[in-house]
Amino acid sequence: MADDEGLEDAVDDIVDAITSTSVEDSTVSTVSVQGAQFVVEAGGSGPTLFLLIHGIGMGRRVFADLRAQLSAYGRVWAIDLPGYGEAAEPARTPTLERVADLIAELLESRGEERAVVIGHSMGAQIALELAVRHPSLVSHLVLAGPTVDPAARSVSGQVARLAQDLFVESPRVVVLGLREYLRAGPHLRRKFRAMLVHHPEDVAPAATVPTLVLRGGDDYVSTRRWCEQLVALLPDGRLVEIDGHGHETFIRDAAPAASRILEFTRD
């Protein structure tokens, strides 16, 4: 076991060196909420809290660049959801609604409220549920590359779109994404199912907080048509596109996304 952990640490060091994902001046803690484990990496300072929620098969490390961009403007939490990254696999794969409730309890246990909640891909679905189920904890909502487009609500549909999207991404994104998918564990299919059975289009009309839908101009997973449909359902939604980016908007050159997020929260 110790040798396995040493090998994993060595691989992490190599991947971080290749992808430049290490972040200085951060603290990492493991937190259990009703038996579910989260890993929280926190940095920055100030009254504003930016909460970053990753997508399917990912983990907190993919947000390193975005964290660096936002930490000058407030505190930033990047989390590993239960069963992702370095967080232990739960006994049962939770629904996205359940994950949102657990995150709410995590925030409340630390006395946090009115966070800027930023979800990417599947994380956008969880962020949306958090804003609807616990609106007092969310000041602004950012849905980046939101899933699941009803036009591709199947494992094969999502995988096909993701594969197409990878053609416009950099090797850095591919290397980092591969590591996180390998870490997602043996139950990735069950996790895909939890993502697919959730219908954000049914939840969006109940989201009363200001919401920014953010997509890369070359994003094949979250199409413009789907994002426009989602914005139309949101009571206070707006759409921003970032040219030259695909689905992994926050992983490759997060500065444009960070700029749009900061402008949105100031508004």
Image (tube, rainbow, N blue to C red):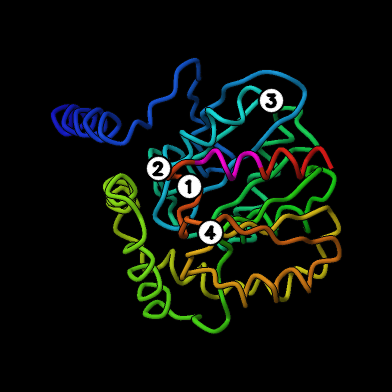
Q: Nearer the viewer, residue 120 or 20?
A: 20
- Give the foreground label among 1 and 4: 4
Residue 216 - label:
4
Residue at 56%, 60% in the rendered image: 145
The relative height of residue 262 versus residue 2 in the rendered view (above or below) is: below
The relative height of residue 267 versus residue 48 in the rendered view (above or below) is: below
Residue segment shown in magenta: 254-259
| Residue at image mark 3 | 73
What element does badge 2 sit on? Answer: loop
- Mark 2 to mark 4: distance in Å? 31 Å
| Residue at image mark 2 | 88
What element does badge 4 sit on? Answer: strand
Judge left or right: residue 74 versus residue 84.
right
Q: Quadrant of the C terminus?
A: top right
What x and y, as percent, mark residue 166?
Answer: 34, 62
- Give the foreground label among 4 and 3: 4
Q: Quadrant of the N terminus?
A: top left
Q: Earlier in the sequence, mark 4 or mark 3?
A: 3
| Residue at image mark 1 | 82
What element does badge 3 sit on? Answer: loop
Crowding at mark 4 (Cα within 10 Å: few <14, some 14-19, many 20+): many
Question: Amino acid type of disc 1?
Answer: Pro
- Mark 4 to mark 3: distance in Å? 23 Å
What x and y, as percent, mark residue 209?
Answer: 83, 53
Q: Tags 1 and 2 in contact by the CB under 8 Å rule?
A: yes
- Mark 1 to mark 4: distance in Å? 27 Å
Q: Nearer the viewer, residue 192 or 217?
A: 217
